[in-house]
Image (cartoon, helix red, strand yellow):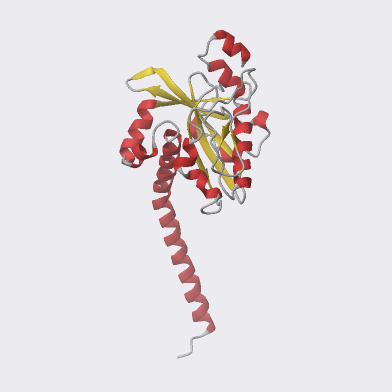
Amino acid sequence: MQQSNTYIIVYSAVLTIVLGLLLSGSSQLLGPMQQEAIALDKKKQILGAVISGEELAAMTPEEVNELYASRISSTVVNISGEEIKEEGLTAEKVEVAKDYKKAAEERAYPVYIFHAAGNPEAVDSYVFPLYGAGLWDAIWGYVALETDMNTIGGITLAHAGETPGLGARITESGVQARYVGKKIFDESGALITVIMQKGEGKDYDDELHKVDGMSGATITANGVNAMLKSYLSHYEAYIKSKSTAAPEAVAAL
């Protein structure tokens, strides 16, 4: 039976309203759960710079949250290394991806401090966020420095759309492990950071500022190199202020 135009219009309007209400309700219901999942993933990435991926993978969400709460404190600094005292501003609230579009001098820089187990006064390492561009889309991560503020204790890297089997390999634990023990400053105190090399299969164990590359992923590797140099340079003043190296070594930095 052929329906009138009025019936079709009314039916379409009612259906649109009902679907809109359902979508709105779903968004309100699922919104908090989505935010919790995003926060949990961020905590895992931060902790992944200081503990093994296998250990993290074995943890429940509750255990991850408990570990983060008991071992991580945070602050926010400016490019001069000074803490920003602003009501309501926390490291967890700073959106590094959005701040990336601002001039370096205008950004807020989160710092995550990993404390010794059972001793909240003792610092094991400092964790700094990273953000940059890969071949196809954004790349980001977190790098941990030991208390000498020169030695990399760990790194986590992630991406939005790098090529599987090539640039996407920055997420592999084996690639990230290459950075552990490397130095970001040279003997003169210049910020060199660590450079992922072109090609793969060479031994850089004796090279303090070099790591092996990824075959066929030179542009992604260059993006990681630029990201490390850029963000560690933004944190350089803070890094030097927190170094526990000998006074003459700090002066060199």
Residue placed at 39% from the left, 39% from the top?
A: 53
Q: Is residue 241 above or below residue 89?
A: above
Provide residue 225's location: percent of width, then percent of height.
Answer: 61, 37
Residue at the spot 61% in from the left edge and 22% down from the top edge: 186
Q: Position of residue 87 (x, y in %)?
A: 52, 25
Q: Is residue 215 left or right of residue 62?
A: right
Q: Quadrant of the N terminus?
A: bottom left
Q: Quadrant of residue 73?
A: top left
Q: How many marks?
A: 0
Q: Position of residue 207 (x, y in %)?
A: 57, 29
Foreground residue, 100 or 116?
A: 116
- Any part of residue 197 in sight: yes
- Work out whether residue 86 or residue 179 is closer to the camera in this orientation and state it: 179
* Residue 132 can be seen, yes or no: no
Quarter of the C terminus within the rendering:
top right
What percent of the width, then of the height, locates residue 153?
47, 28
Which of the two residues, 31 or 139, is positioned nearer the viewer here? 139
Residue situated in front as seen by the camera: 139 or 22: 139
In this picture, residue 72 sits left or right of residue 220: left
Q: Residue at x 41, y 56 (%)?
A: 25
Query: Outermost residue toward the top?
Result: 247
Query: Does residue 134 lie above or below 68 as drawn?
Result: below
**Residue lying farthest to the bottom in this orientation:** 1
Q: Is residue 130 above or below residue 240?
A: below
